[in-house]
Image (cartoon, helix red, strand yellow):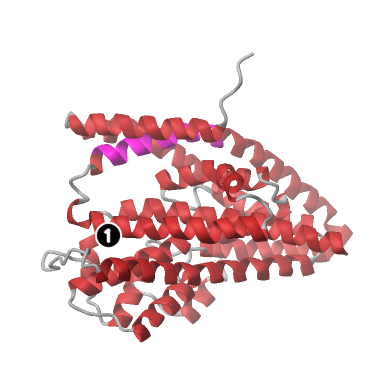
Amino acid sequence: MKKKISLPMQILIALILGIVVGFACYAMQVPDFTTNYLKPFGDIFVNLLKFIVVPVVLLSMIDGILSMGDMKKVGSVGVKTLVYFMTTSAIACVIGLTVANLFNSAHLFPVLSASDASYAGGEFQGFMSTLVGIFPTNMWDAFHNANMLQIIVIALFFGGSIMAAGEKARLVQDIVSAFYAVIEKLMGFIISLSPIGVFTYMAWVVATEGPEIVGNLAIVILCAYAGYFIHAALVYSLSAQFLAGMSPLAFFKGAFAAMMFAFTSTSSAATLPVSKECADNMGADSDISSFVLPLGATINMNGTAIYQCVVTVFLASCAGIQLTLSQMVIVVATATLSAIGTAGTPGAGLIMLTMVLSTLGIPVDYIGLVLAVDRLFDMGRSCLNVTGDIACAVFVSRWEGRKAARR
């Protein structure tokens, strides 16, 4: 009997085939083939993922809260998750600034003119305004707009209320569990289609972007990916080894499927079903991963933090500005704290970058210099964000397991 190829291996094969087909289409100057006939299948797959994300986040978080059976445990898991995300985001900023300044000191960054660049900066209303906005006025609007922060708040309120109602809410608990069991089966089917989405998207990106679009920005992209790699190799490896009690190799092998899908889809939210399967297969408690992963997909932005720092240093050099130590501290603080402030906002990464540049006095129009290759940055930062979500789910599960064993 032939052994079935594992999902991570299927995704890796699809990734390689996508690159090969993409380069072939680019070499033959027929990128429209991938746009017209391959990418639509990838779009269908991503649409299916987006279609299931809202019920997965809502039902998995409510089911996870009910499975914990104790609001104290929910609070304990929530605090550990937030501390982990904020700490790793701050470390990511430091890594991003360090790598960017090394490249800049070596005069590796190109100095480009922003005369042809244009970008209309997104407006950030402030943290308090965003805080008010995460509490929904209409539950159905939150579902319709897929506002993840509002959906998480809805799940927390309903989960806590069902738990507080006790036996009177037994029927509701059974309904939530039954619905979530159905969603899990549907999620498994959609996940099995991942190789198709990876292949079609990778072929489209390679064929349409090609080496020409990279041009002078290749060294900036290389700098960002160096930061992504260092962060993964240090922070996530150490998290796996010392916090989760597993070897870094086993961790990255287990997270590979989600990492590759996030890399091609550039969406942490769309990768949620794959992330949960990877985390659960690595030993994360299903109730904890159901709580941590949706929260991470919304507020964990390690990759985005590195991207912001690298691009900020690059754009500052283009504007003839030499960042001081105090300005770099401002970059770290702004990028770390704004992770939650812009969560759930379309184009959150660029809005956060706009905030940083405005704070430092760098013209926002300079963002136009990197817009053309933003997707190439986004592939790496989405991959890193998702890896951090899985690392946190595994770590918190092991930590809570040890605490329960001591009791």
Which residue corresponds to the image point at 53% horizontal and 76% vertical from the top-left? 131
Which residue corresponds to the image point at 26% horizontal and 82% vertical from the top-left? 361
Where disc 1 sits, the SS reads: helix
When the figure is inspected, residue 10 is found, relative to residue 266, above or below; the finding is above
- Circle 1 residues within 10 Å: few <14, some 14–19, many ≥20: many
Asked if residue 44 lies left or right of residue 327, the reply is right
Q: Which residues lie in the magenta part? A: 191-207
Residue 343 rendering spot, x and y as whole percentages: 48, 66
When the figure is inspected, residue 183 is found, relative to residue 388, above or below; the finding is above
Of residue 1 and residue 271, the one placed in the foreground of this image is 1
Quarter of the image where one finds residue 166: bottom right
Q: Say which residue label 1 marks.
A: 220
Asked if residue 78 lies left or right of residue 126, the reply is right
Which residue corresponds to the image point at 41% horizontal and 50% vertical from the top-left? 266
Q: What type of secondary structure mainly makes up the magenta span?
A: helix
Q: Is residue 298 visible?
A: yes
In the rendered structure, does residue 221 fall within the stretch colored magenta?
Answer: no
Quarter of the image where one finds residue 396: bottom right
Which residue corresponds to the image point at 60% horizontal and 67% vertical from the top-left? 84
Residue 42 rendering spot, x and y as whole percentages: 40, 36
Name the residue furthest front: 106
Q: Quadrant of the C terminus?
A: bottom right
In the rendered structure, does residue 204 fall within the stretch colored magenta?
Answer: yes
Q: Amino acid at mark 1?
A: Val
Quarter of the image where one finds residue 83: bottom right
Residue 251 rendering spot, x and y as whole percentages: 60, 48
Q: Is residue 294 visible?
A: no
Of residue 135 and residue 371, the one placed in the foreground of this image is 371
Q: Quadrant of the N terminus?
A: top right
